[in-house]
Image: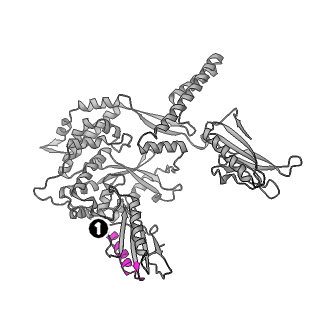
Amino acid sequence: MTIKCQPYYLLRELTAVFIVVVYIPLSPKANEALAELHENIVSLQNKYPDASYVIAGDFNHVNLTDIIPRFYQHVTIATRGNNNLDRVYTNRRGAYRAFPLPNLGLSDHISVMLAPSYSPVVKTMKPIQKSITVWPSNAASVLQHCFESTGWQVFREAATDAGEVDLEEYASSVTCYISKCVDDVTTTRTITIHPNQKPWLTAEVRSLLRARDSALRKGDTEVLQVARRNLSTGIKRAKADYALKIQGHFSTNDPQRMWAGIKSITDHKRGDTECSRDPSLPDALNTFYARFEASNSTPSTRLTVPPGEQPPSVTTEDVRRVLQRVKPRKAAGPDNIPGRVLKDCASQLSEVLTDIFNISLSKAVVPSCFRSATITPVPKTNIVSCLNDYRPVALTPIVMKCFERLVMTQISEKIDASTDQNQYAYRKNRSTADAVSSVLHVALTHLDSKDTYVRLLFMDFSSAFNTIIPQTLIHKLEILGLSHSLCNWVLDFLTNRKQSVKIHNTFSSTIVLNTGSPQGCVLSPMLYTLLTYDCSARHPSNHVVKFADDTVVMGLISQNDESAYRSEVEQMVAWCKDNNLCINVEKTKEIIVLTGPQYLISFQIMYHALE
């Protein structure tokens, strides 16, 4: 039997309360009864997904969580002799505490009192204060008109002295002007998001709620009836509009909107742990992220540009095209220029940005305002025990990301992407599936032969992108045929980078880095793959397969001869040392695949026994 209850006071996160009374006899038909109960509960959940369900009764030895895993059992005491036959399931963890009471009449089952212990969401979670930028409906047209009427040549002339353009002043003044124009058009306000707030609760519904409460306080019965009717109609309309919005996520070819729809339907919430509010944490993390700076003693020396070598350049059309591809919702970097401004005003900004980009390429110098990065730490685990449990996510200027895409095209035209056939990441028509298939194919083919086995060493590197030594990378880019002027530009891009850490509203002091390439930059993946292009097998019986910084060393062993494989691993360790890559021996694992009994000898890496 199922009863739908409507209590006088119902928590906002609940839409209704269903009480289901169950008796499942100890008979061969128990599974049929369980199936019928499952069908009833699922149909109710589909219709009332936010309701609370209380399923109580004599279950004998049947466990409801076998068929409905997200329900929790609250009776932890024996209800008949030493057996727990009477149970209460709800879809709320920790909703009740069970206490035994005497039997009723001649019943051989004891009575159970359930004391509520559920804490409402509004008490367990604090409201979130969030600052949002309000964009007027005509913001795009106002900014377009503003930038069209701007004399950009004035900024260049102001930064020119004796015929020489100060690129730093030029780029900084232009970006500050764009940011100021955005601030003049938009407004910022702080909103409060309550944890039990419904997603369909719009401004219109809030207005109707205030009208109903006002009528209730005044005691006007007729006005109150009208207000309640209007509120009911408004809620139904808001829910219908929200349902259409969620369904619209699946009617486009946008994967981001599709996943947003799936998360809304499944009520999937990320379990990210909030960063500590310790005021010393930002500086501690900034120092920790810059720890590889101490191991870099190689001075950065620019290459001599041969006479007659023309520096690379970009066209206004190239810049306009890359600006139009910017995602409008992309988070702004330290320059506070949103992505939607660059996208909406691509035609108006492309000319001045083209001039800045070409001056940068001709001088092989990157403005410091383009190289600055703000690190937002994201906890890797639910329980943070050390600084390494925070993943650094770098926010860099979107203008610089666009510039990097143009430079990446220049590098791709000079260096063939297929230079490293063992690298499956960041290449067209290549994926993790290709890397896995390659490993399986080579291993299984070798195992078809007699007296063979395969050893696979899965190497893990600590902060691979952050350990890149710019001078080592430039030397390899020169070998690969990249022009000296572009090599010098990459060198300047990677050196003298300003970095700070932001947690909540607290900033760390700024640190200048000359090692690594920040995660989040467009060029970082390509630069890393070019750095590791010469990381390949030296022996014919070995193979090295890479997907970004995930590297597998495969040894195809025959007749128990592991000398080539062991030599390969030693050379790999030496290569990592020469290229400043830190092997994480704790996470480096080995898999041995064999078809019969073999006498295997384990070995160590950096005095650490492999698992």
At 18% from the left and 60% from the top, the residue drawn is 303
- Using a 10 Å C-alpha cutoff, classify the residue at mark 1 as few (fewer than 14 neighbours), some (14 to 19) or many (20 or more): few
User: Is there any visible trace of residue 501 in the rendered image?
Assistant: yes
134 relative to 588, above or below:
above
| Foreground of the two, 335 or 1 | 1
Q: Does the rendering let one see residue 201?
A: no
Q: Quadrant of the N terminus?
A: top right
- Residue 435 appears at what percent x and percent y? 39, 63
In percent of the image, x 41 and y 83: which residue is there?
A: 559
Q: Is residue 506 magenta?
A: no
Query: Which kind of residue does numbered mark 1 sit on?
Result: Asp
> Residue 95's spot in the image, x, y percent?
68, 46
Name the residue that disc number 1 marks: 534
* Part of the protein shown in magenta: 557-580
Q: Is residue 232 left or right of residue 133?
A: right
Q: Is residue 462 above or below residue 105?
A: below
* Residue 484 position by quadrant: bottom left
Percent coordinates x, y for residue 197 in the rendering: 56, 36
Q: Secondary structure at mark 1?
A: loop
